Image: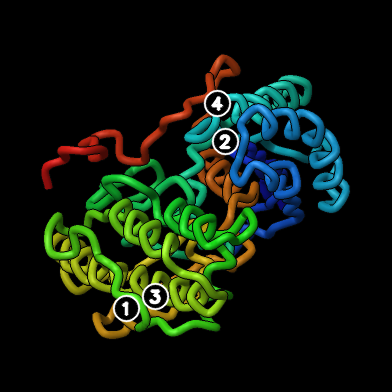
Amino acid sequence: MTEKPIILGIETSCDETAVSLIQDTENDVPKILSNVVSSQFDVHKEFGGVVPELAARSHVEKINLIADKAIKESGVSLDKISAVAATVGPGLIICLSVGLNFAKALSSSLKIPFIGINHLEGHALSPKLQQHIDYPYLLLLISGGHSQYLIVNGLGNYNRIGTTIDDALGEAFDKTAKLLGIEFPGGPKIEIFAKKGDPKRFKLPKPIINKGGCNLSFAGLKTAILKITNEIKTDQDRFDLAASFQKTIEEILYLKTKIAFYEFQKVFGEIKKKFVVAGGVAANKGIRDKLSQVSRENNFEVIYPDVKLCGDNAAMIAMVGLEKFKINQFDKLDLQAAPRLPLDINAKFLKGAGVKL
């Protein structure tokens, strides 16, 4: 029996240094042999956000150690690796370059294919690490840098039907957390604060909720939070504001997802009604519960990656690498990092003041 291919994936697009090895299986759901992620929270904590130069330096210091650990945990010898896949973009270019150069060197030394991966495609396909999913499906990608509704027609074939016109949802969470005095990285801690508060205490805006199709906007919400934080005085006020913010986000996504369902069904009718939610913010339980509710009400099957696969990781990069390996879609070693790399290359640019919806 021919051995199934093993892909080594590398992810360094922002502030996680990650390496993973996965292997194809008979049932089309890869086996994760190792998935090592080293975060840089302590490096950036005092600055309240990611500092690109410090992030890149940390990647340089850790990449060899993380790769060694991932390979040892996998139990795979170097001569059994079929290809090396690394994030090429989008992300911070000086961070992307660290993982990309490491991957190229490894590919060259082992004389195996090198595959450049779109970080967003890693998120888009991440649930396929747990179960077989047929194309097409509707995707909501919500992370620190992106918030988009896309129709996933197949590998490398995406149709964006909605996007944020300003801040990404993860960015809105992080900025709100900072205004509430929550230590970096504060976004994931909003939900913890929210459990102690009254979600009806503060009435917050829902920008472009009645226009723009399933496009999103969070900048106005962030501004409203800023004004309120200048007036609140107690911890309970902060808990109530966190709860109100969490509830408002859930309601925005509920309403916009209903519109996205309609757009998906205009193309595919009542068949193949699958809805994937991926990206770092997909780990938020309140958001999961609300999106599960709207999916049930509209007869969509909702699929989430495991929480540990929602944030940046290299298993999802290896996953896309495996899909590309199967069709011999390899890259040359002169491939450059691409800080801006959309999934739908034909989508209209929608960002900034004056955007017409």
First reached walking from the N terminus: tag 2 or tag 4 = 2
The amino acid type found where label 2 is placed reads: Thr
Q: Is residue 31 above or below residue 201?
A: above
The residue that label 4 is drawn on is 93
Visible residue check, residue 246:
yes
Q: Is residue 198 above or below residue 330?
A: below
Query: In 3D space, how far apart are the residues under numbered discs 2 and 4 (Cα atoms)?
Result: 11 Å
Image spot of residue 336 (x, y percent): 53, 19
The amino acid type found where label 3 is placed reads: Ser
Residue at horizontal 47 percent and vertical 35 percent from the top: 90
The circle on residue 87 is 2
The residue that label 1 is drawn on is 295
| Residues at circles 3 and 4 in contact by the CB criterion of under 8 Å | no
Q: Is 214 in front, or is 127?
A: 214
Image spot of residue 105 (x, y percent): 73, 21
Query: Element type at marker 3?
Result: helix
Query: In 3D space, how far apart are the residues under numbered discs 3 and 4 (Cα atoms)?
Result: 36 Å
Compared across the picture, whether 73 is left or right of 88 comes to right
Residue at horizontal 61 percent and vertical 46 percent from the top: 48
Compared across the picture, whether 3 is left or right of 352 comes to right
First reached walking from the N terminus: tag 3 or tag 2 = 2
The amino acid type found where label 1 is placed reads: Ser
Residue at horizontal 80 percent and vertical 47 percent from the top: 70
The amino acid type found where label 4 is placed reads: Ile
Visible residue check, residue 150:
no
The residue that label 3 is drawn on is 244
Image spot of residue 357 (x, y percent): 12, 47
